[in-house]
Amino acid sequence: MMKPKHFISLLDLTSDEFRSLISRATDLKNNRDPNFQPLKGQVLAMIFEKSSTRTRISFETGMTHFGGSAIFLSPRDTQLGRGEPLQDSAKVISSMVDGIMLRTFSHETVTTFAKHSSVPVINGLTGLLHPCQLLADMQTYFEHRGDIAGKTVTWVGDGNNMCHSYINAARVLDFKLNIACPEGYKPNQAIVDAAGNHVAFFNSTEQATKNSDLVVTDVWASMGQEEEQKKRELAFKDLQVNAPAMNAANHDALFMHCLPAHRGEEVTSEVIDGPQSVVFDAAENRLHAQKALLELLLTKE
């Protein structure tokens, strides 16, 4: 049997595939045809260990637009939360559905699922990576400014799953990534090393955003880190995307944030609600980018 194509990391895509996904997403966004139902009768199982707004709505809506359907599974409602071995769950679930999307804490949950699944597995977010958000972010950049190759992007804040996915995107789409990140919160060294000279580190926000074309940040404490909030507030207090940080960037630089945002912490209201911000475009593009992804993975050609 042919092994299904999975989407676990941006590195699963070639740069050509990534670019054609982006252009397909924009096409689907601008030309919505209710009669175009390439996934008619197909079912996506969506497994959530972490709560979600954008991921759930976008995948569910995308499947519906395409004539398919989606099943929402939380560990509270399934055997997954009761210790059934992951490989057993993967074999059983994949025998009944056409695709599986997981949003989990451990990255290994998704890789194990993919190994034992007979259908495509999509990483809807893990503690290590958030590749679907990058499809939307990059689609948004391309729509506003054209190709990102050779441009400079700045990541401000935690070396988290979003930061890791930006590092991978820098490799696949060939842009430069400046990272401003406090000691002790640096991204995974192996992911950084693999990106070579695509990545550079800076101590201050304004040094990092200097001559940048896109500035991106995320909350200081992600889901599951709430108890570290106070400690993180101290570590990150100088890393805020504010007017001076955006002024150091290129005059036509864009601002993105994967949301939800804590205005007044990692970003000021002035920036996130300002003219350079495309956060709500990027949020909507989760739907269109994931439709392009679902079409790529689930269309039986």
Image (cartoon, rainbow, N blue to C red):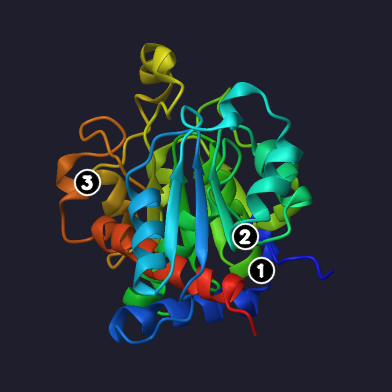
Q: Label 1 to label 2, Cα distance in Å?
A: 6 Å
Secondary structure beneath dot 2 equals helix
* Mark 1 residue type: Leu
Above-or-below relation of 224 to 255 = above
Is the residue under label 2 in contact with that under label 1 (CB below 8 Å)? Answer: yes
Q: Which residue is mark 1?
A: 13
**Disc number placed over residue 243 in the picture, else none:** 3
Residue 179 in percent (x, y) is at: 52, 44
Residue 266 in percent (x, y) is at: 31, 34
**Disc number placed over residue 10 in the picture, else none:** 2
Q: Earlier in the sequence, mark 3 or mark 1?
A: 1
Q: Label 2 to label 3, Cα distance in Å?
A: 31 Å
* Mark 2 residue type: Leu
Is the residue under label 1 in contact with that under label 3 (CB below 8 Å)? Answer: no
Q: Nearer the viewer, residue 239 or 258?
A: 258
Q: Nearer the viewer, residue 113 or 171?
A: 113
